[in-house]
Image (spheres, rainbow, N blue to C red):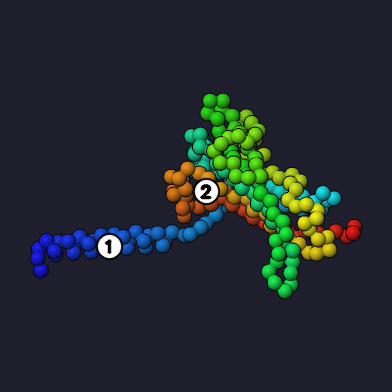
Amino acid sequence: MHLRTRLWLERAASACAVVLLFVLCLAAVPARADYAGTEVTHMLVERSEDGVHLSATVHFELPAVVDDALAKGIPMYFVAEAAIYRDRWYWYDKRVASAARHFRLSFQPLTRRWRLQVSPTPIGNSGLVLGQMFDSRDEALAALQRFSRWRIADAAEVDPESIHTVEFRFRLDVSQLPRPFQIGAVGQSDWNLSASRAVRLQLDHNR
């Protein structure tokens, strides 16, 4: 065999070995592991004349990487999602209503204040959504973690004589982060901040 050909084959084999090792390393990384300590500690669902309301408390501590990004002026995005399913014994439960709240939490280095924006649709980077200002990080997080009588469905969407389950989920929305953060978050549990809980919606005995 020609010397140059043999050298080329040896280099190709070495390159293949490196790629194989890289793939094996990726395979060894868990696909997802939620950040520990994140949970829905309280959840209450109530019927009223104008619809179904959800109150909840989400407990979590921001991971160090998220805290560091916020301190550098990079906003963090969170999403709260609620869905109501009607029980069906003959098929999968039917989703009859859903709602979402999108949050943008940011730190203002010049004023040393925190801003929390809330919207029913993804906020993005426009900054046009009105928000509330807070003097401290803890105050901003407390507002982010509490949900009080959030209307998640109209009364007409929920049959008062059927059994329903309400599912609630809260998570850090990595998809709205800058691209380098999205890539770095893959497989990292510190970025998988999420919690969920489900409760039964009581029948409306007043009808």
**Is residue 76 visible in the rendered structure shown here?**
yes
Return the residue at label 2: 175
Which quadrant of the figure has residue 200?
bottom right
Which quadrant of the figure has residue 14?
bottom left
The quarter of the picture where the C terminus appears is bottom right
Question: Looking at the image, which is closer to me, 190 or 13?
Answer: 13
Which quadrant of the figure has residue 117?
top right
Residue ID at (52%, 48%): 175
Residue 93 placed where, x, y %? 70, 66
Residue ID at (56%, 48%): 173
Return the residue at label 1: 16
Q: Amino acid at mark 2?
A: Ser
Residue ID at (45%, 45%): 179
Residue 96 placed where, x, y %? 73, 59
**Is residue 144 visible in the rendered structure shown here?**
no
Q: Secondary structure at mark 1?
A: helix
